[in-house]
Amino acid sequence: MSNKIISLPSSRRYGITQSMYDKKMQELLQRQHEIANYLETQIKADEVFYITVKSMLELCSKAYEIFESSSMDKKRKLMSFLLSNITIKDASVCYSLKEPFNSLTNLDENSKWWAVVDELRTKYHNEILLFSTQINNFQQQFI
């Protein structure tokens, strides 16, 4: 961007007036400001994303202990937070994990966590950013 900002004396040989130069300079500085704001927004979004994924993984790793030590009301909240389509069929409970928790079900001890975080980032980035407030509130209640 800065290499587009040329000096007024060199621009005069191309027939550029002071007002044209000032207008273009203002446009370029405004665009530079917009790009800086956009980058700052993206950096903050990345920070929120990684904090939320970390919180989500902590919640998942402690879900059993949280469930066992909680009151019925908190158990209900935990189940509704993590699960959908809960039914009972032939004396068995059937359910579906809500997104993005369903991405974590195929992990084993040898899985590489960075690959999972990368998948969450690419597939569910916007959902996780929206989800950050919910998981933080939930985490404060249970952990």
Image: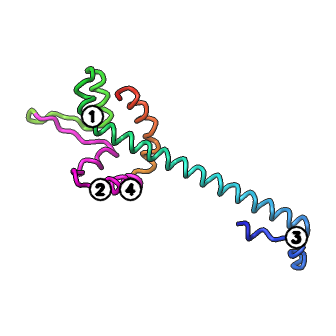
Q: What is the CA distance from the residue labelled 2 to the residue labelled 3? A: 56 Å
Label 2, secondary structure: give it.
loop
Looking at marks 4 and 3 on the same chain, the residue that comes earlier in the sequence is marked by 3
Q: Residue at x 30, y 32 (%)?
A: 80
Between the C-alphas of marks 4 and 3, the distance is: 48 Å
Q: Position of residue 123 (x, y in %)?
A: 39, 54
To which residue does mark 4 refer? 118
Q: Are marks 4 and 3 in contact (CB under 8 Å)?
A: no
Q: Which range is magenta?
A: 92-121
Residue at 21% across, 51% down: 108
Return the disc, 4 or 2, that comes first in the chain's sequence. 2
Measure the C-alpha gap from mark 1 to mark 2.
21 Å
- Name the residue: 44% across, 39% down: 132
* Residue 66 in picture, x, y percent from top left: 27, 29
In the figure, is residue 70 to the left or right of 135? left
- The secondary element bearing badge 1 is classed as helix
Q: Circle 2 sits on which residue? A: 112
What quarter of the picture does the N terminus occupy?
A: bottom right
**Farthest left residue?**
90
Instruction: Indicate yes or no whether the magenta region holds residue 112.
Output: yes
Disc 1 to disc 3: CB gap under 8 Å = no
Residue matched to label 3: 8
Which amino acid, by three-letter code, is at mark 3?
Answer: Leu
Between the residue at mark 1 and the residue at mark 3, the CA separation in whole angstroms equals 65 Å
Whether pointer 4 and pointer 2 mark residues with C-beta atoms closer than 8 Å, the reply is: no
Marks 2 and 3 close (CB-CB < 8 Å):
no
Residue 143 located left or right of residue 125? left
- Does residue 132 appear to the left or right of 66 in the view shown? right
